[in-house]
Image (cartoon, rainbow, N blue to C red):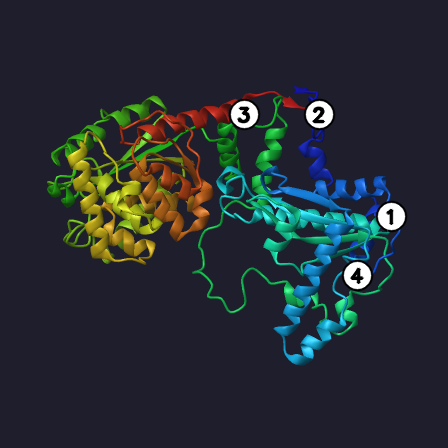
């Protein structure tokens, strides 16, 4: 049975099925498109003007077009100072004349003479001046999009200028963008406060010239480059390409298809919030019918514990792993309650192989992180390959929850995170389970010493050998193998997330298979999650390890899939 689609009374009333049936359906009518392209092609930098006034309604329309420009974070940082005062215009004209002479003096004599032959502004002739200002007083981090590109507010103002220019051309007005100013002098002229900068002076008025081509082209100052000279394919020519990738993320058809399928539910899009996004990711992987999976728990001990970096004896690792094999550890109990199978991997537990665990142990001598590499390159490669095979094998179930056991592994994970993220020990070294302030100091010192020994500029696999634990190598391999068969990988806490990060650095497409199960209490987990680009499903302040957070999140994810399968559908 299907139901009529609820159509919102505001916003976009179209359905995904409509958009899929006609992807180009949002196009403007042919006449409107032709007019837009004519305006773009006929836009000119006008320098000569008639003195006739610009009607207020026309000025309002073109400023309104500028105000509809796109802006980073919808911040609308532009301010338009409309200059009509003759005294201000006269002072601005003096500034442009001075700067024109300064610029000409910096050129070769012939080029300088040619510049002086040109009329480069119409400040005196145009009836209006419009100075576009950018209000930058809001900190970049406080505007969506500026934390990564702080100058995006200036780009937004440039987009407003372009809108104004095209609207002016459509109205028959001429506009010229004059930058023959020293920014501080123009700002002083207008009394701009600190933090507000100008993008130059726009001359606006009825043109006393109707140039068929850009002015600097007509005087042979320069020529427009062919489009083929400015369009590049994928990378800058001659740049060294990264190593070829073996894996591919779901194609756009699969990603969009998952969203299209969700649009057919009798509920507002995104009604389950972050869980909806995680379910979309699973559906894009082709796992919409997923009903179960496996907890893969990798365990190892670490020689660095001799430096006093853990509150528990190394024997605890073996105890927990033995309990896990028996199905009695916290993580395996949680897995059983969630309907997940369990695979326990012995990646180097002290005291010899653990009975009942899948063996994946290093064969070569191991270092203590501080004075020598944790693993040899050969062992690292073997453990990665073993993990990859396990990921392929158990990824066939569709979902792999990652867990780890290992006294001291938060110290190892912190060192590895520092190396691959290029951050200091303080950013990622936390208390672990049960540590105190003195122990935290010893952990940070161990991490700092390890980084000093290993050096900088390590590639991910070299960093894994120098600083990572064997269970992290196995888990990184599991992630690679599971992603290869399009399984969903639900990641647990800090150490498992660092292993997943290594896998992503080796094969970026792996990220599309990851679901962050939880945000743990361990310092540095947020930093690693941000590097993974994954928002966690749960934030329960867990310290359990053993994959408990991944299992709880996996159960939630499976429930979200079941909800989506069983929910009512709309008829289009």
Image coordinates of residue 160 in percent, x first then y, are: 69, 46
Marks 3/1 in contact by CB < 8 Å: the verdict is no
Marks 3/4 in contact by CB < 8 Å: the verdict is no
Q: Secondary structure at mark 3?
A: helix
Residue picked out by circle 2:
10
Between tags 1 and 2, which lies in front? 1
Q: Gap between marks 1 and 2, in whole Å? A: 40 Å
Instruction: Between residue 136 and residue 287, name the one nearer to us.
Output: 136
Q: Gap between marks 3 and 1, in whole Å? A: 62 Å
Residue picked out by circle 4:
47
Image coordinates of residue 291 in percent, x first then y, are: 44, 28
The quarter of the rendered structure image containing the C terminus is top right
Residue picked out by circle 3:
564
Image coordinates of residue 409 in percent, x first then y, are: 22, 40
The structure residue drawn at horizontal position 44% and vertical position 28%, both measured from the top left corner, is 557
Image coordinates of residue 12 in percent, x first then y, are: 70, 30
Between tags 3 and 2, which lies in front? 2
Q: Quadrant of residue 390?
A: top left
Residue picked out by circle 1:
53
């Amino acid at each position: 049975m299907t139901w009529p689609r609820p159509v919102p009374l505001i916003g976009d009333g179209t359905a995904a099925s409509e958009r899929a049936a006609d992807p180009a359906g949002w196009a403007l009518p042919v006449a409107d498109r032709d007019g837009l392209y004519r305006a773009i092609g006929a836009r000119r930098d006008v320098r000569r003007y008639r003195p006739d006034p610009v009607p207020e309604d026309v000025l309002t329309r073109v400023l309104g077009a500028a105000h509809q420009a796109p802006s980073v974070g919808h911040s609308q940082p532009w301010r338009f100072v409309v200059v009509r005062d003759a005294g201000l215009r006269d002072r601005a004209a003096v500034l442009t004349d001075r700067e024109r002479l300064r610029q000409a003096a910096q050129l070769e004599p012939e080029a300088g003479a040619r510049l002086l032959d040109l009329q480069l502004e119409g400040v005196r002739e145009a009836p209006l001046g419009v100075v576009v200002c950018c209000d930058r007083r809001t900190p970049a981090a406080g505007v969506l999009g500026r934390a990564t590109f702080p100058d995006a507010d200036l780009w937004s103002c440039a987009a407003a200028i372009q809108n104004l220019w095209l609207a002016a051309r459509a109205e028959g007005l001429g506009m010229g963008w004059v930058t023959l100013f020293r920014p501080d002098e123009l700002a002083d002229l207008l009394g701009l406060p600190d933090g507000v900068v100008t993008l130059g002076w726009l001359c606006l008025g009825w043109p006393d010239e109707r140039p068929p081509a850009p002015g600097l082209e007509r005087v042979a100052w320069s020529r427009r480059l062919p489009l083929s000279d400015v369009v590049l394919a994928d990378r800058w020519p001659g740049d060294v390409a990264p190593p070829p990738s073996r894996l591919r993320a779901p194609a756009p058809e699969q990603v969009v298809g998952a969203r299209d399928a969700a649009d057919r539910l009798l509920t507002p899009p995104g009604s389950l919030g972050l869980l909806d996004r995680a379910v979309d990711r699973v559906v894009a992987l082709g796992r919409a019918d997923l009903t179960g999976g496996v907890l893969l728990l990798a365990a190892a001990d670490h020689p660095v514990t001799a430096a006093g970096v853990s509150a528990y004896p190394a024997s605890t690792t073996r105890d927990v792993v033995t309990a896990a094999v028996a199905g009695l550890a916290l993580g395996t109990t949680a897995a059983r309650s969630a309907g997940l199978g369990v695979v326990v991997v012995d990646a180097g537990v002290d005291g010899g192989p653990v009975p009942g665990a899948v063996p994946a142990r290093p064969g070569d001598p191991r270092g203590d992180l501080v004075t020598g590499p944790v693993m040899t390159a050969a062992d690292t490669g073997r453990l990665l390959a073993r993990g990859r095979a396990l990921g392929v094998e158990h990824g066939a179930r569709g979902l792999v929850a990652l867990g780890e056991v290992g006294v001291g592994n938060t110290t190892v994970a912190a060192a590895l995170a520092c190396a691959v993220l290029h951050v200091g020990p303080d950013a990622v070294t936390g208390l672990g389970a049960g540590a105190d302030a003195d122990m935290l100091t010893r952990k940070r010192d161990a991490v700092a010493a390890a980084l000093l020994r290993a050096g900088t500029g390590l590639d991910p696999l070299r960093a894994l050998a120098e600083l990572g634990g064997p269970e992290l190598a196995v888990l990184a391999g599991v992630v690679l193998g599971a992603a290869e068969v399009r399984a969903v990988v639900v990641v647990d806490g800090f150490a498992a997330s660092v292993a997943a990060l290594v896998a992503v650095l080796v094969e970026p497409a792996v990220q599309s298979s990851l679901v962050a199960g939880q945000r743990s209490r361990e310092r540095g987990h947020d930093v690693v999650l941000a590097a993974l680009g994954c928002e966690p499903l749960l934030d329960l302040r867990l310290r359990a390890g053993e994959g408990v957070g991944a299992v709880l999140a996996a159960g939630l994810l499976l429930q979200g899939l079941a909800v989506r399968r069983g929910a009512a559908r709309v008829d289009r």
